[in-house]
Image: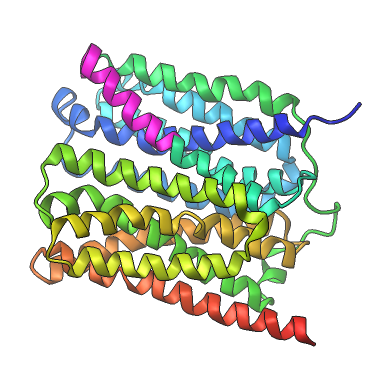
Amino acid sequence: MKKDYQKTLTACYLGFITQAITANFTPLLFLRFHTYYGISLGKIALIPTAFFITQLLIDLFCAVFVDAIGYRRSVVLSEVTSCLGLAGLAVLPDLFADPFVGILICVIIYAIGSGLIEVLCSPIVEACPFDHKDAVMSLLHSFYCWGSVGVILLSTLFFAVFGIEHWKIMACVWALVPFYNIYNFATCPIERLTEEGKEMTVFDLAKKPLFWMAVVLMVCAGASELSMAQWASAFTEAALGFSKTVGDLIGPCLFAVMMGISRVLYGRYGAKMNLIRFMIGSGILCLCCYLTASLSDNPVFGLIGCILCGFSVGIMWPGTISVTSPRLPDGGTALFAMLAMSGDLGGAFGPSLVGMAAQQSGDNMRSGMLFGCIFPLILVIILLILDRSLVKKKDR
């Protein structure tokens, strides 16, 4: 029987939507946790820290153990843990004397799922016999963007209609997405990315200059994306003078929409483009967006810089994967895990550095954003070096 790889692709689409749910739903409840459970803001600040640290540990875990456990078991586990973590938010906090303990347990459980999804979905799609895989990969990653927008808008609408006090129902509703996707991953065709026994180890990868260039690209991609995404709301409010509501909706939401549009466009027309040149152009646009947001005295231009930044960073993460994977064909799970970890490192430290730069300049968000220019600048330099080296190899 002919294998239905479209089912595999659909499962991975829902996987990235699941990851978007785990990353974006709980932050919408931070104020509710503070007022209803009496959890201090200092403790609440540990929630995203626990989420990202867990993801980083899972990235390292995947590099060593996933090939032994198997892709299917691992990716089914990603949906099971995501479902349990989200549904657990409705139950566990009330079972502990300190509700924060229950919340943190749920966050760690669904962060395990999110980390597995991040590492596994890309190589699963890469192993499928699709044409123009770089375009397919870009479209795949766009579903994280659409998932983020959907979670923010639909959750906000639910809270507006039914009240924030019914947030536990919404947590269970979002848990249905990974619950349904357990069946998809359990039954869809999944191929091995490399022949058994031929996968490169992390130590093998470390001997390849291309691997280290890809690591730097992923760090810069994660930092360029999340530095603007996480500070967009505060920046539009504090530096550009927009209201809190406008800052929340226009900042993160339109940023995610533009990032999704970028990935869909490359997914649609990528077969006709040179991926590295497209990434160079995107990096230059990203640099211009950071400069516009930080230096423009006109708040409208500053806002346009924030929004267009979403479009500029869209191709960076999936593009780096697509550039690297075919040139290191035996990289296997270790390659995808290390690239994911590098992107997470950039996403974890980039926004912190921007925040520290703003603090050092007297809480000036414009100065923080100006410091953020370093990430797309380094990315463009590495891409130019990579493009030049590939052209030389082609001419030989």
User: How many numbered circles does the render carry?
Assistant: 0
- Magenta stretch: dominant SS? helix
Query: Which residue occupies the foreground of this view, 364 or 6?
Result: 6
Q: Give the residue at x 41% y 17%.
A: 172
Residue 75 figure quarter: top right
Q: Position of residue 127 (x, y in %)?
A: 76, 47
Magenta stretch contains residue 164: yes
Relative side of 116 to 99, left or right: right
In the picture, the quarter occupied by the N terminus is top right
Above or below residue 346? Residue 30 is: above
In the picture, the quarter occupied by the C terminus is bottom right
Query: Which residue occupies the foreground of this view, 163 or 333?
Result: 163
Q: Give the residue at x 17% y 67%.
A: 296
Q: Position of residue 170 (x, y in %)?
A: 35, 18
The residue range painted magenta reads 147-165
Q: Position of residue 88 (x, y in %)?
A: 41, 22
Q: Position of residue 255 (x, y in %)?
A: 34, 48
Above or below residue 340? Residue 120 is: above
Q: Give the residue at x 28% y 21%.
A: 157
Query: Which residue occupies the foreground of this view, 281 or 166?
Result: 281
Magenta stretch contains residue 44: no
- Asked whether the viewer can see residue 384, the reply is yes
Relative side of 376 to 156, left or right: right
- Asked whether the viewer can see residue 62, the reply is no
Above or below residue 262? Residue 335 is: below
Relative side of 322 to 235, left or right: right
Relative side of 58 to 127, left or right: left
Report the coloring of the rendering.
rainbow
Q: Which residue occupies the extreme right position in the image?
A: 1
